[in-house]
Amino acid sequence: MSVNVSKVFVRTMDGTNKCLGDYKGQVLLIVNVASRCGFTKQYAGLQELQNTYGPKGFQILAFPCNDFGGQEPGTLEEIQTFCSTTYNVNFPLFEKVHAKAATSEPFTTLNKTEPSGDVEWNFEKFLIGKDSIVLYRFKSAIEPNNEELKQAIETALA
């Protein structure tokens, strides 16, 4: 199933509504994140991807989520501080969402991608093409430095 995110609205950290269609023309990696997860160290790799591919039209969009094991209990300010001081994150963080059971955007829409099904854990990744169509879905165990993920980003950017 081809899923288009161009009409999906999300909320920024400051509470502003943002349409994912505003990113059309860029390649996106949408990730549900958590600060107290076994995969939290992936923030470093995500920032490395942003540094490498950002100048070429790539953008990571991170959505804090407390659905899995209560691993993101902090306030938005605490999450932002943790990410910037611990991992020097400079990609956008959005308001907390519910990825489990797809009760919040962007995951209500993203969970319709193939393979379908709810997000299973923190740090699941969705690669979105320049045309706002979901290209790939990568499970949590796929690290940001994974060659398949990097190749998919490079192909989408080409």
Image (cartoon, grey):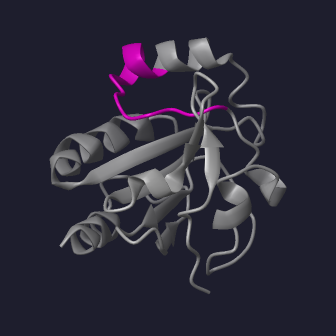
Asked if residue 43 shows in the view, the reply is: yes
For residue 30, above or below residue 138:
above
| Image quadrant occupied by the N terminus | bottom right
Residue drawn 36% across the image and 43% down it: 46
In the rendered image, residue 123, in percent from the top left (x then y), is placed at 55, 48
Q: Quadrant of residue 74?
A: top right
- As for residue 89 lying within the magenta part, the answer is yes
In the rendered image, residue 139, in percent from the top left (x then y), is placed at 55, 63
- As for residue 63 lying within the magenta part, the answer is no
Residue drawn 21% across the image and 51% down it: 53
Q: Main secondary structure of the magenta part?
A: loop
- 1 on left or right of 92: right
For residue 97, above or below residue 31:
above
- 129 on left or right of 114: left
For residue 125, above or below residue 63:
below
Residue drawn 37% across the image and 34% down it: 91
- The residue stretch that appears in magenta: 83-95
Q: Quadrant of residue 42?
A: top left
| Image quadrant occupied by the C terminus | bottom left
Residue drawn 69% across the image and 77% down it: 116
Q: Quadrant of residue 112?
A: bottom right
In the rendered image, residue 109, in percent from the top left (x then y), is placed at 68, 65
For residue 45, above or below residue 125:
above
In the rendered image, residue 16, in percent from the top left (x then y), is placed at 60, 30
- 92 on left or right of 97: left
